[in-house]
Image (spheres, rainbow, N blue to C red):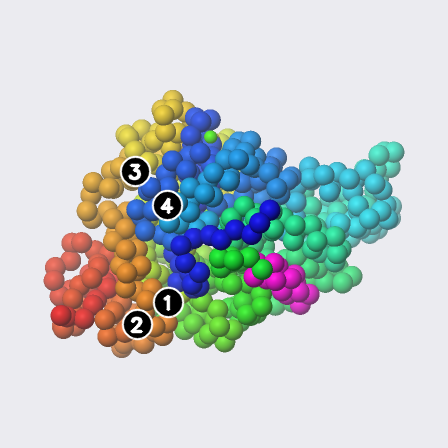
Amino acid sequence: MPETTTGPSTTAWWRTASIYQIYVRSFADANGDGIGDLAGIRSRLPYLRDLGVDALWLTPWYVSPMADAGYDVADYCDIDPVFGDLGGAEALIEAVHEHGLRIIVDIVPNHCSDRHPWFQAALAAGAGSPERGRFWFVEGRGEGGDLPPNDWQAYFGGPAWTRITESDGSPGPWYLHMFTPEQPDLNWEDPGTLAAFEEILRFWLDRGVDGFRIDVAHGLMKKHGLPDVGPVPIPDDLPYQDRPEVHDVYRAWRRVTDSYAGERVMVGEIWLPTPEQYTRYLRPDELHSAFNFEFLCSAWEPAAIRDVIDYTLASHASVGAPPTWVLSNHDTIRHVTRYGREDTSFDMGHKRHDDPSDLALGTRRARAAALLSLALPGGVYVYQGDELGLAEVVDIPVDRIQDPTWERSGHTDRGRDGCRVPLPWSGDAPPFGFSGAHPQAEPWLPQPARWKQSTVAAQSEDSASTLNLYRDALALRRKLISQLPAAVTWIDAGADVLAFSRSDAFTCMVNFSDVPIALPGGYRLLASSDDTAGGGVLAPNAAVWLGADS
Ligand code: NOJ
Ligand code: CA
């Protein structure tokens, strides 16, 4: 298939892009089965164009048994029937471009599904075969090999190893799965793995996608010998992540994306302790950008946020990569809820689902955080529902929970369903327009009745809504902010305020305190996260954008 060019320009669009994350299962459902699909996304492209984002990132759409909501891929080159088909994906890519948007798809290289033909062939082929060499099959320890090969724990809880039974009924080796047992880790030391994924990248690049979000990008390589982590694991030196050899994979992939016209990009999902570590993946011949999880995890406190901003800017500048800013995604607790808690920080391993939250306060802070993140240099991510100010749904009945984390943790971690509830589009009752022409449909996760105030339709009518705040801010960002020099100049405005300018024409101020603060004179108000504040005042827990007084 010939190479395709995409999008209207070939400038480095990704350096300043606003990218909207679509959680495919929960965005829009066209056929009324209660699960979001590609036709649903197509029908909502005008909404996304009018919101003012530059690109879309779609969570996995591939054939999958859905043991981990599509992050268990059984065929990387076809679409799961619940979402549509390949023709529908091609039509969607084209329609996205017709709406002046770009599209990034999720690629899941650390593991595949246990139903993938690669794993099925490995099970069938037996010990020592090349098919088994694609995965990590290792003899167990202890008498009879009935203990796991090492002490690694899966991210969702429990041991990272499962023992197989050979076809003759005898107990076999164990295989590695850093997530669920249905997600066997691929062996990236096997040259066939790299070759296979290069083909997969080309398959989608040939179909016009503008790039890839790379799942668990830091995890592909494992330390030789698969050593124990020991009783006190060293976060900077874990044998299953951030191994030096992984960089060669991305250098090879970069050669692939660079061989296509149209600025195709790769965005890494890299959970590592510091930006200094993850920006090594952003050297000029590796990935283009990565999610800034330090920003997401930071407490909503001025000194902490300023620190994150400073070291994000410095570490990204050292490799020439654009910083990014992200407040929420499909794995975290929605930031309206986080910011309304006493402890406003986020820890993936300890989500504190039961912590109480003052949602009015959380909403004020989330609106301020929106203006802050959209004002900073680099790229920004908006997770579907951020623009509606949605809070985490903390009361999903336990018999409706779908996230495997719930079972794998022995019912101690409710998991991530609370940020994955289908979007409310319109109307007064569930499914709130999620299933379009099928008002009787039952969404795959229950929507709270209180969302009738949060629908796109309701918020479109309200000039003070979070949706309209995002629309106005994204428009200004495109017109003004994305053109500004990348440097941030801090302005001293007291311990409770973060203030910075990007030029004489643009200043952002955030008040983290509970009292109003006088704004400096000589500016024009461009945007405010608080509509109730009178002139000349920066309201509590609010942010403003100021322009030059003309
Ligand atoms: C990160 C994804 O964002 C998450 O949803 C998934 O469960 C894991 N990677 C495993 O693929
Ligand atoms: Ca559907």
For the residue marked with disc 1, what is the amino acid? Pro
Marks 1 and 2, how far apart at CA: 8 Å
For the residue marked with disc 4, what is the amino acid? His
Prevailing SS of the magenta stretch = helix
Q: Residue furthest left?
A: 535
Q: Residue furthest top?
A: 440
Q: Secondary structure at mark 4?
A: loop
Q: Do the residues bearing badges 1 and 2 touch, measured as CB atoms within 8 Å?
A: yes
Q: Nearer the viewer, residue 126 or 413?
A: 126
Q: Do the residues bearing badges 1 and 4 touch, measured as CB atoms within 8 Å?
A: no
Residue wearing tag 4? 99
Q: Nearer the viewer, residue 13 or 375?
A: 13
Marks 3 and 2, how far apart at CA: 34 Å
For the residue marked with disc 3, what is the amino acid? Thr
Q: Residues within 10 Å of mark 3 (few under 14, many from 20)?
A: many
Percent x, y of residue 318 = 50, 76
Residue wearing tag 3? 455
Q: Nearer the viewer, residue 103 or 547?
A: 103
Give left or right: position of 357 versus 284: left
Q: Residues within 10 Å of mark 2 (few under 14, many from 20)?
A: some
Please check the rendered image and state whether residue 254 is part of the magenta-colored stretch, yes or no: yes
Q: Is residue 382 visible?
A: no
Over which residues does the magenta segment extend?
241-258
Which mark is in front, 4 or 3? 4
Q: Quarter of the image containing the C terminus?
A: bottom left
Marks 2 and 4, how far apart at CA: 30 Å
For the residue marked with disc 2, what is the amino acid? Arg
Query: Residue 377 — which label?
Result: 1
Percent x, y of residue 79 = 56, 37
Residue wearing tag 2? 502
